Image (cartoon, helix red, strand yellow):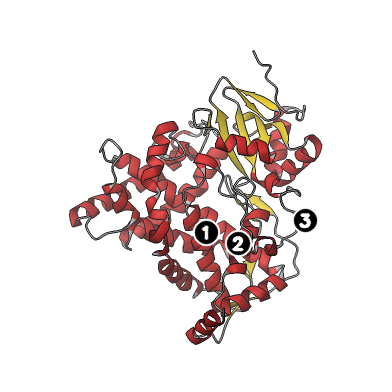
Amino acid sequence: MTTVGLPGGPTSPGFVQILEILSGRTRAWRRLHDRYGSAFTVTTPRLGRTVVLSDPAEVKALFTAGPEVADNMDVNLGQVLGPGSLFSITGDEHRKQRKLLTPPFHGRRLQAYEEMIEQEAVREMASWPSNREFATMESMMRITLNAILRAVFGADGAEFDELRAVLPRIVLLGSALVALPIPRNLLGRFGPWARFATHRRRYDRIVDRLIDRAEAAGLDGRDDVLTMLLQSRYDDGTAMSRSEIADELLTLLTAGHETTATTLAWTVERLRRHPDVLRRLVSEADAGGSELREATLLEVQRVRPVIDVTPRQIRVEELRLGRWTLPKGQNVLVSIRLMHDNEELFPRARTFDPDRFLGARPGTFSWIPFGGGARRCIGASFATLEMNVVLRTLLRDFTLEPTDAPDERPHFRGVALAPGRKGRAVVHRRAVRPTIDVVEQAEANA
């Protein structure tokens, strides 16, 4: 038998280690990295003794291992998103389900969402105050929630208003239930799990009505995600069940708006503190360009990853992974934060520098805000498009006022790390927008 060897780590009581992580995740990961190196074993909330990795070679090996070797943890978002969610299912079932969900968020279909996203951004930003500081994150949440609702269901209506009310509650409460060891029977029907179940039942009733309406009206001519799922078939010809559709739609709706909105709030926070980059972005937007904007969004996600870890659980008897031999059932976290801090991968890693991505695409196994391998976020392309369009709209329609205020500290919301003051901004509506002639001339000159 091969001797099982785990990375070293702190010997303090488990509850002390958990409290340190809860009090400041980024600070805790960096302190442990400084002491133990690119791999360590630590006691984490809900997961117990967990191996944390950030060595690029070991991370690549883990990401490229098949699902029969390393797959999602038993403790994951599927506990609140449902048994049919991509977070819950594993192995071949996960591959089949992912294959059905991929088409709406890739290729030419993806580009069809651009005008719709801009419409939502313009509508929401019309309510922004001028010359007065305000928090942008809730506003970004409304933009991204409305956008994903339209992409999923294709139209507006009374059910949309209900979903706009219930989904933020599902996200906030569900994140806490997944992150913290809260007993299911705590406080009975008045407890957090019972409240979550009430929200989930309300959501399921809304989706049932929307499915009934879509089927009664006929699916021909519709191109929204709901219609695609209703028409999709597995390899054996069977259709998705209503419960599977409801779980997958909840996954897309919740995961598809909070993280994107939070990244946009971080983008505002970063740009206000880097006026030179902000000035260049405005000039580029006025000329119809996008290269620096795309690089800036890559850099925001590097220095302020909204999700700072991505999980795996060992499924084989033991797995040799670089320097370590991990036993079956071992929980492993890939630290996105520590990967993005790596000076060998990203020189001057603590510096916000979008220029590092000009003309250079990030590495698949080094820049990983969407995770990696078979579990990489299925909506990554949609989120990237959405962030680009919303930032472009902001730069075109508003002047964002710089600030010398201290950086906003990351605030852990259960799953996502958000700006502590919700991405505060001061904006002024621009009196003159660049005309189509200006953009066309810039393209002709290029």
Q: In screen coordinates, is 92 left or right of 408?
A: left
Going from the N terminus, do you reach mark 1 or mark 2 first? 2
Q: Which residue is mark 3?
A: 348
Location of residue 403 (image quadrant): bottom right
Crowding around mark 2 (Cα neighbors within 10 Å: few <14, some 14 to 19, many 20+) is many
**Which quadrant does the C terminus fall into?**
bottom right
**Which quadrant does the N terminus fall into?**
top right
Q: What secondary structure is found at the residue carrying circle 1?
A: helix
Mark 3 vs mark 2, CA separation in Å: 18 Å
Residue at image position (40%, 67%) is: 116
Residue 271's x, y, as percent? 67, 67
Residue at image position (75%, 63%) is: 406
Residue 30's x, y, as percent? 75, 43
Residue 9's x, y, as percent? 75, 30
**Is residue 313 positioned above or below 81 on the image?**
above
Please state which amino acid type lies under the numbered disc 3: Arg
Pointers 1 and 2 in contact (CB under 8 A)?
A: yes
Please state which amino acid type lies under the numbered disc 1: Thr
Going from the N terminus, do you reach mark 3 or mark 2 first? 2
Residue at image position (50%, 43%) is: 174
The answer to whether one can see residue 7 in this image is yes
Going from the N terminus, do you reach mark 1 or mark 3 first? 3
Query: Which numbered marker is on residue 354?
Result: none
Residue at image position (52%, 67%) is: 390
Foreground residue among 323 and 412 = 323
Foreground residue among 440 and 22 = 440
Q: In screen coordinates, is 43 left or right of 261?
A: right
Q: What secondary structure is found at the residue carrying circle 3?
A: loop
Q: Which residue is mark 2?
A: 297
Q: Which residue is mark 1?
A: 384
**Is residue 396 positioned above or below 177 on the image?**
below
Q: In screen coordinates, is 346 left or right of 111?
A: right
